[in-house]
Amino acid sequence: MPPASQSRAIKAAALVGSGLASYARTRRAKEATILTFHGLCESAGDPGILDWSLHLPVAVFRSVCAMLAADYRVIPLADLVEARLHHKSLPDNSVIITFDDGYASNFELAYPILKKFNLPASIFVTTAFLDGEDIMWFQRVDLALGRTRKKQLDWKVNGNKLCLRLGTREQRQESLVCLMAEMKELHDTDLLGEVDRLEQALEVATPPLADLPAPMRPLTWDMACDMIYSGLIEIGGHTHTHPILSSCDSLAMRAEITTCRDRIRAETGDLPISFAYPNGGADDYTRESMLMVREAGFKCACTTISGRVDQHASMFQLPRYGSPESVWEAEATVSGAFETLKEWRQSCLKAMSLI
């Protein structure tokens, strides 16, 4: 576990063990929480994947779901939309579970657990990924750095020179983090060409879907429909090819949003009501993005900006927390303990500045 994750895990365990999470859950009961997951995996990791932050061990997810089922009210995202439309309150301690991208593990590993605990969830799908047209661009980058036989690559991207060290797995992971930060700054029209150029330089080919490591494989539309028919799972939009929308021009942005909507409706028979911005940070979508999502018929859109959902939250900028890496972190997050601690610290600092 990386040092930052270890520190957060220790802090979360302390907040739960001290009783602060229980206190916060009562104090902040009217606020809802949206959790973001991506894929799940059977064990600690597949050596064929460098970035394991997107694939949570299934045992952790099972423990999180057990805790949520026992102590919180897990509701569909559609209930939040309805409550806002009709000016109603949500149940106390409401939690919404979401998944991004559309991995097969959502069906194979997460869905049986959700059914066991009767927990609803929303899955935001990248429709070209489910269509089998291509793997997502960031998967290609991960696999290219992981599969190349080169030990080092001097690379220029986004006007910056990078030395990508590839001698060990740890070096490849560090190079991936560095490279991804630069590639996310590229304009959408340049991104796929850059990925092509990178694969050529590393002397690797884009793998077919059948050759992907299991956690990277996409849902099928049949899997998606099976989950919808259960009444527990909603399928939402996540664009067609997973670009960062703020890097797209207006025509490309509209096409990504509407094509995604149309593919979901064509395959499931349902018009999706919810959307999630790829990457989802404050700089990853624009006012124009929000207007286009709304014009396409979506009723809400989620970011990845951390925060709790109260009555003032914008329905097209809903905050979400990232995937918790332990049941303690999940409880500290959904209870509001992290925010409560932060508020106390700020109050103390303010008081000290007045002395």
Image: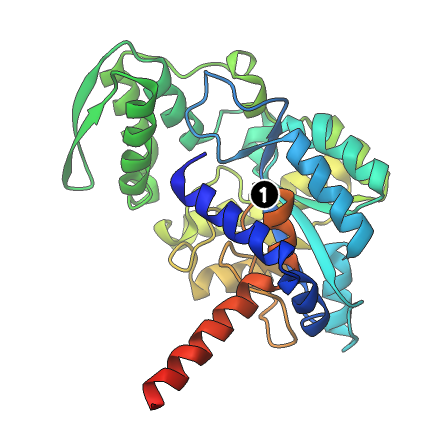
Please name whichever residue, 35 or 160, is drawn nearer the observer in this view of the structure: 35
Q: Quadrant where the C terminus lies?
A: bottom left
**Please, is residue 217 above or below residue 303 in the view?**
above
Residue at 68% in and 26% down? 220
Left/right of residue 323 with respect to residue 159 in the rendered view: right
Please name whichever residue, 61 or 126, is drawn nearer the observer in this view of the structure: 61
Residue at 49% in and 58% down? 305
Q: Residues within 10 Å of mark 1 (few under 14, many from 20)?
A: many
**Please, is residue 146 above or below residue 84 in the view?**
above
Q: Which residue is mark 1?
A: 260
Please name whichever residue, 130 or 120, is drawn nearer the observer in this view of the structure: 120
Q: Quadrant where the N terminus lies?
A: top left
Residue at 68% in and 64% down? 32
Q: Colour scheme in the image? A: rainbow
Q: Quadrant of residue 94?
A: bottom right
Q: Which x, y percent locates residue 124? A: 62, 44
Q: Which x, y percent locates residue 148? A: 31, 13
Q: Quadrant of residue 194?
A: top left
**Please, is residue 311 above or below residue 341 in the view?**
below
Amino acid at pointer 1: Cys
Please name whichever residue, 269 or 115, is drawn nearer the observer in this view of the structure: 115
Q: Secondary structure at mark 1?
A: helix
Q: Residue furthest top?
A: 149
Residue at 52% in and 46% down? 9
**Please, is residue 107 above or below residue 73 in the view?**
above
Q: Which x, y percent locates residue 284? A: 41, 54
Residue 74 visible at all: no
